[in-house]
Image (cartoon, grey):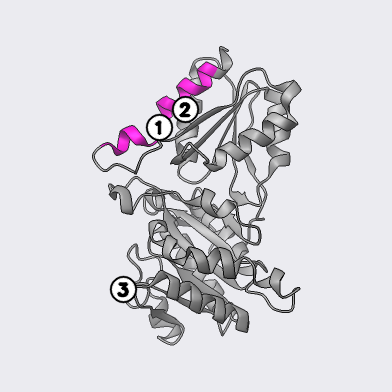
């Protein structure tokens, strides 16, 4: 297998999809000759032409309005929102049009060919307008799927699954890992099932759950915990909507403890939904309260980014607190 970083893996998935579907189009701000602000679409305009890989005006609502129309026509629409922070002008198009197309028509028409890629999260000193994690806003919307990869192998397989899926999908890409995460990735086509969490490491004392860039953080925390004699079961949620409650319930039933970590603010973050579900389903098995290690209820700070983002030490402290309860 080839060594790829996450950007190369995403580019490979897009390349395969463009070759597979003659009508597929990639569009967004600066995605053409420039290859996108992070270069995820580099070389694709030269390969497939300006009529299939092209820049749009700086209007996110327009990007998604066009994407809905293209997908309704039947062509795979591969839209990029340059930063997840910019997705809010397109919120109406996504939650009121993309998510409801199939429902409102009684399945007479749909936009199942729509995939929205967008970089999310911190780690690049981007400040309050380039660092947000808005996944919980969309998790409240039936009709969408939300997927988050943790490494290059996952990114390619999950993105290919998103593009093949017969539903509109938002693919959140952890921008901090774009070049930092490198691993072996098959050059050929493959998919990873959407809606299925992965038990990355089995353990017996506590379950630790995250997704995207936080996976690296909880793995570091688990190493500290192992040194302290605590066995951690590590789970990557991978898919936020739908999310794999069954795998997590099975794990927490075994360990009796759960720590959830995500970058988004703690209040109404998706960790709250997970905690509520596990409290209901695993109540008689829980040995301690469910812990959440998340971002703060404040705009994402520039100077204090390290203090804001959940790190391995914060997660380790939560693990100890849970085990020692």
Location of residue 234 with respect to 115 vertically, above or below: above
The answer to whether the residue labelled 1 contacts the one labelled 2, judged by CB atoms less than 8 Å apart, is yes
Residue at 62%, 33% in the rendered image: 275
**Could you tell me which secondary element the residue under label 1 belongs to?**
loop
Q: Which residue is mark 3?
A: 34
**Could you tell me which secondary element the residue under label 3 belongs to?**
loop
Residue 315 lies within the magenta run: yes
The answer to whether the residue labelled 2 contacts the one labelled 3, judged by CB atoms less than 8 Å apart, is no
Q: Residues within 10 Å of mark 1 (few under 14, many from 20)?
A: many
Prevailing secondary structure class for the magenta stretch in the rendered image: helix
Residue 259 lies within the magenta run: no
Q: Residues within 10 Å of mark 3 (few under 14, many from 20)?
A: some
- In this orientation, does residue 13 appear? no
**Could you tell me which secondary element the residue under label 2 belongs to?**
helix
Q: Which residues are magenta?
A: 304-321
Residue at 68%, 36% in the rendered image: 277
Q: Residues within 10 Å of mark 2 (few under 14, many from 20)?
A: many
Location of residue 233 with respect to 110 vertically, above or below: above
On the image, the x and y values in percent for residue 251 come to 69, 31
Q: Which residue is mark 2?
A: 315
Viewer-proximal residue among 290 and 213 = 290
Q: Which residue is the extreme one toward the top?
A: 324
**Direction from residue 233 to residue 48 in the image, left or right:** left
**Direction from residue 130 to residue 218 in the image, left or right:** right
On the image, the x and y values in percent for residue 72 come to 61, 80
Alpha-carbon distance for marks 1 and 2? 6 Å
Q: Quadrant of residue 246?
A: top right
Q: Quadrant of residue 84?
A: bottom left
Alpha-carbon distance for marks 1 and 3? 34 Å
On the image, the x and y values in percent for residue 126 come to 29, 50
């Amino acid at each position: 297998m080839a060594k790829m970083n996450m950007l190369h893996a995403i580019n490979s998935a897009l390349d395969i999809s463009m070759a597979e579907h003659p009508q597929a189009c990639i569009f967004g701000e600066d995605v053409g000759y420039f290859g996108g602000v992070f270069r995820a679409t580099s070389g694709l305009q030269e390969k497939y032409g300006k009529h299939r890989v092209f820049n749009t005006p700086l209007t996110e609502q327009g990007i998604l309005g066009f994407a809905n129309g293209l997908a309704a026509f039947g062509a795979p629409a591969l839209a990029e929102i340059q930063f997840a922070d910019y997705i809010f002008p397109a919120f109406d198009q996504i939650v009121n049009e993309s998510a409801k197309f199939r429902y409102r028509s009684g399945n007479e028409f749909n936009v199942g060919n729509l995939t929205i890629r967008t970089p999310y999260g911190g780690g690049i000193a981007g400040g309050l307008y380039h660092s947000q994690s808005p996944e919980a806003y969309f998790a409240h919307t039936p009709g969408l799927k939300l997927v988050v990869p943790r490494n290059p192998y996952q990114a390619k397989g999950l993105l290919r699954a998103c593009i093949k899926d017969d539903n509109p999908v938002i693919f959140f890409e952890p921008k901090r890992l774009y070049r930092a995460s490198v691993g072996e990735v098959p050059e050929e086509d493959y998919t990873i099932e959407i809606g299925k969490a992965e038990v990355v490491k089995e353990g017996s004392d506590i379950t630790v759950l995250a997704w995207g860039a936080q996976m690296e953080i909880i793995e570091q925390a688990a190493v500290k915990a192992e040194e302290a004699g605590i066995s951690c079961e590590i789970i990557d949620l991978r898919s936020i909507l739908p999310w794999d409650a069954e795998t997590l319930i099975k794990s927490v039933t075994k360990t009796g403890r759960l720590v959830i970590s995500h970058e988004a603010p703690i209040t109404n973050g998706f960790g709250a939904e997970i905690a509520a579900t596990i409290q209901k389903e695993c109540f008689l098995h829980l040995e301690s309260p469910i812990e959440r290690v998340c971002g703060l209820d404040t705009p994402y700070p520039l100077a204090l980014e390290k203090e804001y983002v959940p790190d391995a030490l914060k997660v380790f402290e939560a693990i100890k607190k849970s085990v020692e309860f």
